[in-house]
Image (cartoon, helix red, strand yellow):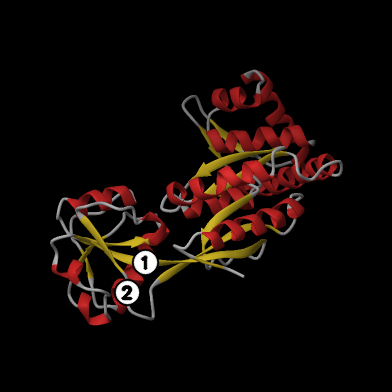
Amino acid sequence: MNIRDLKYLVALVDHSHFGNAAKACFISQPALSMQIKKLEATLGVKLLERSNKAVLITESGREIAARARLILSQVEEVREYAKLAHDPYQGQFKIGIFPTLAPYLLPLIIPSLTLSFPKVSFYLIEEQTHELIEKLKHGELHAVFLAAPVHEPSFHFENLFEEEFMLAAPSQHALAKLKSIKQNDLDNLNLLLLNDGHCLRQQALSICEKMHARETEKFRATSLETLRHMVVANVGVTLMPKLACHANNNITYVPFDAPTPSRSIGLYWRHSTAKALLIADLVKEIKKIMAENKMVIAAS
């Protein structure tokens, strides 16, 4: 058994297809099949159920593949340690970020980060929160932006900033005339919310519960921009993170009275990462950038 065989097994689990897995591994399909059979013989356990139509992974196969992912991640970290011994501020850096933050935060920070770290190639991956967590755990990402809290013992995190929510209302709406939103202002009011899978949906539902508001039935948006368009079209009101509050003549953003609803944004990474020194400096730079931005409260 070797590292290459573990890569082949993980690729097969990911693709559930010999042809596609072989392409991903840059080998022929017969060669992949032969190596998997050798791995089964070495381990003394059946990893696959083979048929003409599909490849089914056995329970043992999935368990072994899950452990293989961890081994492959650790091997990659060993390689990274060796590279970074010469210069920790070089090479690829893969950052994950969720969709309700990416379009509003990245334009603020990426230009400065590329100037401050000219030998680092930043790769940006936008996924929903649960996907980011899995990719970080498996070593596919170096760090991810997430809304706290995230309970994962293998992660270290640093709080970056606190972002308050605003009420986004059509300019002619009665709530748009208020200087601030008090708790009872939303009693029995229907709010437009995001679809399942967005962490912002859960945060919004929690706020609705505290303020006795409800979700608008038969509508769920796929993005904050969709919500903004619905508000502009006078369909209803919604909650909007402050970084996403872009000026529009047909929409008014009203702040909440204290205690102001907000979300905490942090950067998360694995305890074992070889990029720890670079990440520490990235955190300092991002905090500096956000401290200069008056829309959020930067962490000290």
Residue at 53% from the left image edge and 29% from the top image edge: 17
User: Which quadrant holds the N terminus?
Assistant: top right
Q: Report helix, strand or loop for mark 2.
A: loop
Residue at 58% from the left image edge and 53% from the top image edge: 144
Query: Callout 2, which amino acid?
Result: Phe
Q: Position of residue 52 (x, y in %)?
A: 49, 24
Q: Label 2: how many residues lie within 10 Å, few (<14), some (14-19) or many (20+)? A: some
**Frontmost residue, 28 versus 267:** 267
Residue at 22% from the left image edge and 56% from the top image edge: 251
Q: Earlier in the sequence, mark 2 or mark 1?
A: 1
User: Which quadrant holds the C terminus?
Assistant: bottom right
Task: Give the total of numbered labels.
Answer: 2
Query: Callout 1, which amino acid?
Result: Phe
Please state if 39 lies on the left or on the right of 159 as rendered: right
Determine which of the numbered discs, if any, sits on residue 234 in the image: none
- Residue 264 visible, this angle: yes
Q: Which residue is mark 1?
A: 165
Q: Which residue is mark 2?
A: 256
* Relative height, residue 191 to residue 117 (above, below): below
Q: Position of residue 149 (x, y in %)?
A: 53, 68
**Frontmost residue, 180 versus 133:** 180
Q: CA distance from mark 2 to mark 1?
A: 8 Å
Q: Mark 2 touching mark 1, by CB under 8 A? A: yes
- Residue 40 visible, this angle: no
Q: Position of residue 233 (x, y in %)?
A: 16, 50
**Frontmost residue, 289 versus 264:** 289
